[in-house]
Image: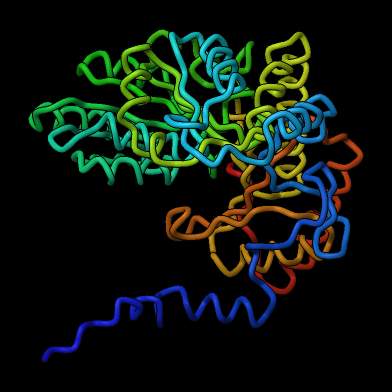
């Protein structure tokens, strides 16, 4: 009788196993580090105070007393969890209020709330798309977008990051595919921190009869006069068919949403498996997101947006002046300020040196970025003050001098 192949065989000796083992042995693993307090501008992490330049808490609202009180109020009223899906026993007035106010904020007919941002993308793309359709995506789009496309079994046509000549080629090819065509791009790209050129993308979608979905996870609560994201910033809201957002960035909680036409949102409510067959978001998370949204939509909102972008410009310019290679220029300034390193191991070693110097940043290596494109992803909050950012820049300066004397030059600013 033939012996079955062990389904677990693939976990042994995979391509990353040796690198992972070496990183763990040298205490160079930049992931799963233990946070020991609130996610503020300065945090307690593994027994030491560190400046937090690796959080998506862009507006700093996780520490806002009103947001925390709203979470407590929801906990006290509804308990720790709903133990059921939205379809059955998991819908609260909080969900309905949040969906209504999200739609008002986005300027759309309706919105639907998912338990996570990942589910929002997967549950929408896996439902709206079907075999026979074509989906065109930027190669730097969120992983959850790719996951949703793969689940849908639609024909996937990716194009190189922000190369709209390549996007147009994909649209031309899609014309012969039959079926519907959907273009999906991030408004702000999570690793690079740059903004999709939405006006031209809208033009191309119109010219070729394609629908457009924009993932505003890193733009909502940051860009535009209302903080409604890149679509608002560029004045193309009416031309974007669907907009996705998450609560785990500026909205200081956990969850996600899709905003768009009534007929699409209603279809998702009764057809999206990621919505129908998962537990409803816990009340405290929903209450916190609603409170954060109300602050964003209040007269305080524009001041918060201005402060986080001002901090991003300050950090960007400071790193540039120290000789680091950073993404520069308007309107590419977002709370995400990536430092290009290139080599994976150099990026990890530089991360560790900064960590030991009291600064926490994120590391992006292949396959999160293209081969040879390793970077340190730094990000700022509206609640960072200049004294803290200056301390971080001093640490970057000291670490760079020592690092380059031991490991060679790092990539410098573009000429």
Q: Position of residue 190 (x, y in %)?
A: 54, 40
Q: Position of residue 77 (x, y in %)?
A: 72, 28
Q: Position of residue 54 (x, y in %)?
A: 69, 48
Give left or right: position of 59 versus 111: right
Residue sitting at x 76%, y 32%: 76
Quarter of the image where the N terminus is located = bottom left
Figure quadrant of residue 328: top right
Q: Position of residue 395 (x, y in %)?
A: 83, 55
Image vertical order of residue 306 relative to residue 351, above or below: above
Quarter of the image where the C terminus is located = top right
Figure quadrant of residue 26: bottom right
Q: Out of 272 and 37, give the one closest to the viewer.
A: 272
Residue sitting at x 71%, y 22%: 291
Q: Out of 142 and 70, give the one closest to the viewer.
A: 70
Residue sitting at x 70%, y 53%: 361
Give left or right: position of 167 versus 94: left
């Amino acid at each position: 009788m033939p012996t079955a192949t062990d389904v677990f065989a693939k976990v042994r000796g995979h391509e990353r196993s040796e690198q992972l083992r070496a990183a763990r042995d040298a205490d160079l693993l930049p992931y799963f580090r233990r946070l020991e307090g609130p996610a503020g501008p300065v945090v307690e992490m593994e027994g030491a105070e560190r400046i937090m330049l690796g959080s998506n808490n862009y507006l700093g609202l996780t520490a806002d007393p009103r947001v925390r009180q709203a979470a407590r109020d929801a906990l006290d009223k509804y308990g720790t969890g709903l133990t059921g899906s939205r379809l059955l026993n998991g819908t609260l007035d909080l969900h309905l209020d949040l969906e209504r106010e999200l739609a008002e904020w986005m300027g759309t007919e309706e919105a639907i709330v998912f338990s996570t941002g990942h589910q929002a993308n997967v549950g929408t793309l896996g439902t709206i798309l079907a075999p026979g359709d074509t989906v065109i995506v930027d190669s730097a789009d969120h992983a959850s977008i790719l996951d949703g496309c793969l689940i849908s079994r639609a024909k996937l046509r990716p194009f190189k990051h922000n190369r709209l000549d390549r996007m147009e080629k994909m649209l031309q090819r899609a014309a012969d595919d039959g079926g519907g065509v959907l273009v999906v791009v991030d408004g702000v790209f999570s690793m690079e921190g740059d903004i999709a050129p939405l006006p031209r993308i809208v033009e191309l979608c119109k010219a070729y009869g394609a629908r457009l979905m924009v993932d505003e996870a890193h733009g909502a609560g940051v860009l535009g006069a209302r903080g409604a994201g890149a679509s608002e910033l560029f004045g193309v809201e009416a031309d974007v068919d669907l907009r996705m957002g998450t609560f785990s960035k500026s909205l200081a909680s956990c969850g996600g949403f899709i905003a768009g036409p009534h007929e699409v949102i209603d279809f998702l409510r009764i057809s999206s498996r990621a919505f129908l067959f998962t537990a409803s978001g816990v009340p405290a998370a929903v209450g916190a997101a609603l409170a954060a949204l109300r602050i964003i939509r209040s007269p305080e909102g524009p001041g918060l947006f201005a402060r986080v972008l001002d901090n991003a410009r300050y950090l960007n310019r400071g790193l540039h002046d120290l000789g680091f290679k950073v993404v520069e220029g308007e309107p590419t300034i977002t709370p995400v300020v990536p430092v290009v390193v290139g080599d994976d191991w150099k990026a990890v070693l530089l991360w560790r040196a900064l960590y030991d110097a009291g600064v926490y940043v994120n590391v992006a290596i292949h396959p999160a970025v293209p081969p040879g494109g390793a970077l340190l992803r730094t990000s700022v909050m509206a609640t960072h003050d200049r004294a803290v950012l200056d301390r971080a820049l001093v640490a970057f300066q000291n670490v760079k001098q020592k690092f380059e004397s031991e490991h060679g030059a790092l990539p410098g600013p573009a000429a």
